[in-house]
Image (cartoon, helix red, strand yellow):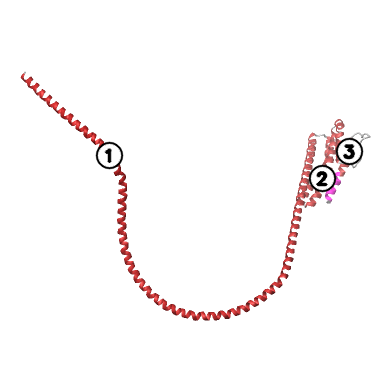
């Protein structure tokens, strides 16, 4: 640990000694069962302070202030102890910034503890409640600082666990890489063995390549002879092809003439086909019209067949009406005669 922390611990020890001397001067002598050893821990100091709290209430505010100072000193010693552990953890993790913050806080607390004796003197002389409340606030700050120190220690432990996990992962990866490298080396050794076994095969293949080259030379000579024969035969074939091409050109001219004649005949036939198609279209139209008219004609025939009895009835009725009209005309003529007679009789009268 650095020299500054050692000095701070020495200051804390001196302050604890001074607080104990003040307690011995101002408190009543302890009983036979009391513990007066100078090297007791912070937990024993807190127990003694709690056991003597009832007697301190009777002694007055000075004794209570002394008890509070003893409690503060115990908490300070506990905080310094925790600070030492945190400093060791920070040195392991390499956290210099947090160490500087903790050192500044410790120096600040040491300055406050240096001023505690002066505050005790002021409390003895004045017993001001405001300074008492300030002391209580300082104690609360010390408790909060101790809680923060424990939290930081837990965080550092968590970071150490994460670092150990990361180191374990790295070791696993290195082991896997080593296994892969060993497998590759073994595969390379097997490949080398196979290559040594393939050397004899390569020699056999070289011998076969030499034999194939000799066969190629022989085949080249035979191919040259065959090519010469093929060239001579191809010349004869070219001459024959020229004669046949002349004959084919003459035949093509004849075919062209026949094609012109066929084109004229095709045009004439096309005109005839168009005329026939127009006639066929007309016939199709007439046939469709006739097919459309067939149901209409059948319906007309049915209607006429239905109308024939009606017409016969009408003619019979018309005949009866004509007879009735004739009878009525006769009656009308008779009435006219009677009217004429009556009119003549009236005139005579």
Please tell me whether residue 9 belongs to the stretch shown in magenta: yes
Q: Which mark is drawn over residue 82? A: 2
Give residue 223's position: percent from left, percent from top: 56, 79
Res 135 quadrant in image: top right
Side of 194 where 14 appears, left or right: right
Q: Nearer the viewer, residue 192 or 255?
A: 255
Q: Residue at x 7, y 20 (%)?
A: 345
The residue lying at 31 percent from left, 54 percent from top is 281
Mark 3 highlights which residue?
22
Q: Are marks 3 and 1 in contact (CB under 8 Å)?
A: no
* Labels 3 and 2: the sequence-earlier one: 3
Label 1 – label 2 distance at C-alpha: 131 Å
- The answer to whether one can see residue 114 in this image is no
Residue 50 higher or lower than 283, as above or below: above
Instruction: Name the residue carrying label 1.
Output: 305
Q: Vertical placement of 248 versus 91: above or below?
A: below
Quadrant occupied by the C terminus: top left
Question: Looking at the image, which is closer to me, 272 or 61?
Answer: 272
Range of residues picked out in magenta: 3-12
């Amino acid at each position: 640990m650095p020299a500054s922390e050692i000095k701070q611990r020495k200051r804390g020890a001196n302050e604890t000694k001074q607080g104990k001397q003040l307690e011995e001067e101002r408190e009543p002598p302890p009983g036979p069962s009391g513990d007066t050893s100078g090297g007791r821990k912070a937990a024993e100091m807190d127990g003694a302070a709690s056991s003597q709290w009832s007697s301190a209430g009777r002694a007055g505010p000075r004794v209570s202030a002394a008890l509070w100072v003893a409690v503060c000193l115990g908490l300070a010693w506990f905080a310094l102890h925790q600070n030492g552990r945190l400093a060791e953890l920070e040195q392991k993790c390499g956290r210099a910034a947090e160490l500087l913050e903790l050192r500044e806080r410790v120096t600040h607390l040491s300055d406050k503890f240096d001023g505690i004796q002066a505050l005790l003197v002021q409390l003895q002389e004045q017993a001001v409640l405001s300074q008492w409340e300030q002391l209580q606030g300082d104690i609360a700050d010390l408790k909060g600082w101790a809680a923060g120190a424990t939290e930081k220690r837990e965080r550092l432990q968590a970071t150490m666990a994460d670092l150990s996990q990361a180191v374990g992962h790295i070791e696993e990866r290195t082991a896997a890489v080593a296994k892969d490298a060993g497998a590759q080396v073994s595969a390379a050794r097997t490949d080398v063995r196979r290559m040594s076994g393939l050397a004899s095969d390569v020699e056999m293949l070289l011998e076969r390549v030499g034999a194939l080259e000799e066969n190629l030379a022989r085949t080249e000579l035979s191919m040259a002879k065959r090519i010469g024969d093929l060239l001579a035969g191809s010349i004869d074939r070219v001459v024959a092809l020229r004669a046949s091409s002349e004959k084919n050109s003459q035949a093509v001219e004849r075919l062209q003439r026949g094609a012109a004649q066929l084109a004229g005949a095709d045009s004439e036939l096309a005109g005839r086909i168009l005329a026939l198609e127009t006639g066929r279209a007309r016939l199709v139209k007439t046939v469709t019209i006739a097919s459309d008219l067939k149901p209409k004609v059948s319906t007309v025939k049915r209607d006429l067949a239905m109308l024939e009895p009606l017409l016969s009835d009408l003619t019979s009725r018309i005949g009866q009406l004509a007879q009735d009209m004739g009878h009525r005309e006769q009656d009308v003529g008779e009435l006219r005669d009677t009217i004429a007679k009556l009119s003549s009789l009236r005139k005579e009268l």
